[in-house]
């Protein structure tokens, strides 16, 4: 069987991803988007201590079975040391595969059809959890292969795939205004 090819895109600022069969450059974030990205990175970094890597705008070469490898760049990503050991730093720079956890923060210009395609691609490629943050609705949605649960102000996001991770929705959105 012939190996599937890889879609190679140049590095750009902001990054360019492959979504719905085309190159799509990410939108340069607003303060609130950037602040949410920073806060979520901080929460995940504290939670991931000794478990894995966390980074924002980290390019992954996502490889759904039977499909071409393509670049996706989650706003924040977590990749466990179980899947890619600490000692494998060169492979971690632009990993082949998906993060264990991908965070996507919606921007005003994001088209739902593009966001849904990215989520579906992450899931087909084996991502355990996608966290979708909607700054306008002030909600956080946890999406895995079988469920989609939305958390709003006054609630705390928890999920069995990320044991011990707690994101207080009200606190996150209040802190994003500072």
Image: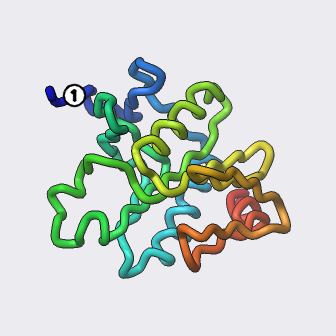
| Residue 152 rendering spot, x and y as whole percentages | 81, 58
Taking 42 as reference, is 7 above or below it? above
Left or right of 72, for residue 113: right
Residue 41 placement, left or right of 73? right
Using the image, determine if residue 119 lies above or below residue 170.
Answer: above
Q: Quadrant of residue 124?
A: top left
Q: Which of 34 and 94 is in front in this view?
A: 94
Q: Which residue is drawn at 44% across and 56% down?
A: 77
Q: Name the quarter where the N terminus is drawn.
A: top left
The residue sitting at 47% across, 22% down in the picture is: 20
Q: Name the residue under label 1.
A: 4
- The quarter holding residue 169 reads bottom right
- Residue 159 position, x and y percent, is 63, 67
Q: Residue at x 33, y 29 (%)?
A: 67
Residue 66 lies, in percent from the top left, at 32, 32
Give whichever of 131, 107 is nearer the camera.
131
């Amino acid at each position: 069987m012939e190996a599937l090819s890889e879609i190679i895109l140049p590095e750009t600022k902001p990054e360019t991803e492959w979504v719905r069969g085309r190159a799509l450059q990410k939108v340069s974030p607003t303060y609130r988007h950037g602040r949410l990205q920073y806060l979520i990175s901080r929460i995940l970094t504290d939670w991931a201590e000794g478990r894995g890597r966390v980074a924002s705008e980290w390019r992954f070469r996502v490889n759904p079975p039977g499909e071409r490898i393509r670049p996706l760049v989650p706003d924040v990503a977590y990749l466990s040391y179980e899947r890619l050991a600490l000692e494998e730093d060169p492979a971690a720079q632009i990993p082949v595969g998906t993060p264990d956890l991908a965070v996507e923060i919606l921007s005003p210009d994001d088209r739902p059809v593009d966001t849904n395609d990215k989520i579906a691609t992450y899931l087909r490629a084996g991502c355990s959890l996608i966290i979708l943050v909607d700054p306008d609705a002030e909600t956080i949605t946890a999406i895995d292969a079988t469920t989609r649960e939305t958390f709003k102000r006054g609630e705390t996001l928890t999920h069995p795939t990320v044991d011990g991770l707690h994101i207080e929705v009200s606190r996150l959105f209040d802190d994003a205004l500072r």
